[in-house]
Image (tube, rainbow, N blue to C red):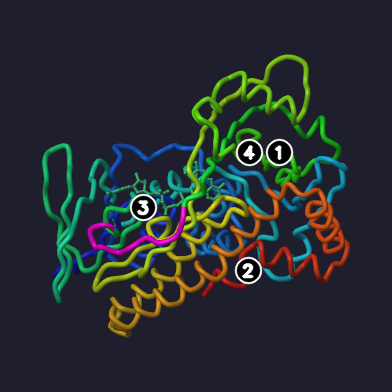
Amino acid sequence: MVRQAPVIVAGCGPAGATLALYLARKDIPVLVLEREAVLPVDLRASTFHPPSLEMLNELGVAAPMIAKGLIVDRYQYRDRQTGEVAEFHMSLIADETLFPYRLQLEQYELTRIVARVLQGCPSAELRFAHEVTGFRQDADGVTVKVATPAGAKTVKGAYLVGADGASSRVRKAAGIGFGGFTYDEKFLVASTAFPFEEVFDDLSYVNYIADPQEWCVVLRTDKAWRVLWPTDPDHPNPESYLDENDLQERLHRLHDKEGPYRIRHRTLYDVHQRVAETYCQGRVALIGDACHINNPLGGMGMNGGLHDAWNLGGRLVEIFAGRATHQDSFGDYDRQRRELATRFVQQHTIDNKTLMESTDPNVQRNRQRDLMARAADSAKAKAFIMERAMMHCAWE
Ligand SMILES: Cc1cc2nc3c(=O)[nH]c(=O)nc-3n(C[C@H](O)[C@H](O)[C@H](O)COP(=O)(O)OP(=O)(O)OC[C@H]3O[C@@H](n4cnc5c(N)ncnc54)[C@H](O)[C@@H]3O)c2cc1C
């Protein structure tokens, strides 16, 4: 039997791994080319929303993730000045989803679990230390250029999916623009095992803390507490934000404990709002950060990438079965997912940031009152939770 040319997936991050698993579960040949020699273990996204968990459940990997992660069934918007708390209970959406909670789990746990499953799937192959550097395509397929420790080579496939992150070589090789903007300020993140839940009254595991002087996000992952702050865009030496003294001061402003915090991890990163001008070109498609990036407020970046993978996976199955053409189906994928990234994810994440960062105490007071009124009204609270959990847009 002649083996069909595979779908080549560039990148084994959350989006690429999920797409590969989707295809492997349907016996579609898939070849994942990952640039790194081992799966990257960087502390990035840590929130899985309910629709993502439903998709991962259908792919058979939700259970091991839930076993490793932290189930968070409520989240809070706190006002640091007044101490007021608006709390949203995710049990309000229990009639809408099998998973009425956010799962807090480092994204690398997902890729590790999926990679292990892929290695046992006969139609899937995962090659490490294979960096996609370019491609050619014609009416019959794609020829992908790859840099490996043994030198440059080419690999042939039926389709190429760029799941190679924000600096996507696939997107660049296709000449697809990545319009939008980069914020002037960077975001600073520090993680610590200090038990904040023991010193803040009734603290949930996900908290957005507004303050005209210094807002922050305080959330717990499966491993530690993580605090995210904005930084001053005009600071002459932003790298100094990573200094021990600076971070200790910030953490002590959050809670003035005795002695220094043990900081496990720190990072300072640029924040962008960008969407690719198209998600496909001929036999090539983009998913995840390769085609959309946004600020992390609300945890929509990685989740959006998983939803892309689900959408495109379903389309590739139809194309391989001869029930759809890639021209039509990739075009629909582009319209559906790009419109959603622009209208919903970009808008929400920009609004989330704008609301948190206002230095006007009146704006902050009104924001907190509005959130508390919503939280107290179960119909409004449910609508709020549904929207923030991406319940309506994930399956589009
Ligand atoms: C510091 C930081 C914090 C973040 N925090 C959050 C958060 O709290 N919530 C949230 O939702 N999102 C967050 N994000 C964004 C989130 O991490 C991304 O949305 C998510 O990782 C995107 O997944 P992906 O699979 O599309 O891309 P990536 O995770 O970037 O994976 C891309 C993969 O492709 C590989 N690769 C790259 N180039 C090539 C190539 N040429 N050939 C082959 N392989 C290649 C990479 O090694 C990697 O394995 C954060 C991002 C950063 C940088």
- Amino acid beneath label 1: Glu
Q: Is residue 221 left or right of residue 43?
A: right
The residue range painted magenta reads 172-181
Q: Which residue is mark 4?
A: 229
Rendering quarter of residue 62: bottom right
- Amino acid beneath label 4: Trp
* Marks 1 & 4, CB-CB < 8 Å contact: yes
Circle 2 crowding by C-alpha within 10 Å: few under 14, some 14–19, many from 20: some
Q: Which residue is mark 1?
A: 214
* Marks 2 & 1, CB-CB < 8 Å contact: no
- Amino acid beneath label 3: Leu
Q: CA distance from mark 1 to mark 4?
A: 7 Å
Which is more toward the observer, 4 or 86?
86
Name the mark nearer the viewer: 3 or 4: 4
Relative vertical location of residue 366 with respect to residue 357 in this rendering, above or below: below
Looking at the rendered structure, which numbered label has been put on residue 391?
A: 2
Circle 1 crowding by C-alpha within 10 Å: few under 14, some 14–19, many from 20: some
Q: Position of residue 55 (x, y in %)?
A: 52, 64
Q: Along the polypeptide, which appears first: circle 2 or circle 1? A: 1
Q: Is residue 360 left or right of residue 167?
A: right
Name the mark nearer the viewer: 2 or 4: 4
Q: Which residue is mark 3?
A: 118
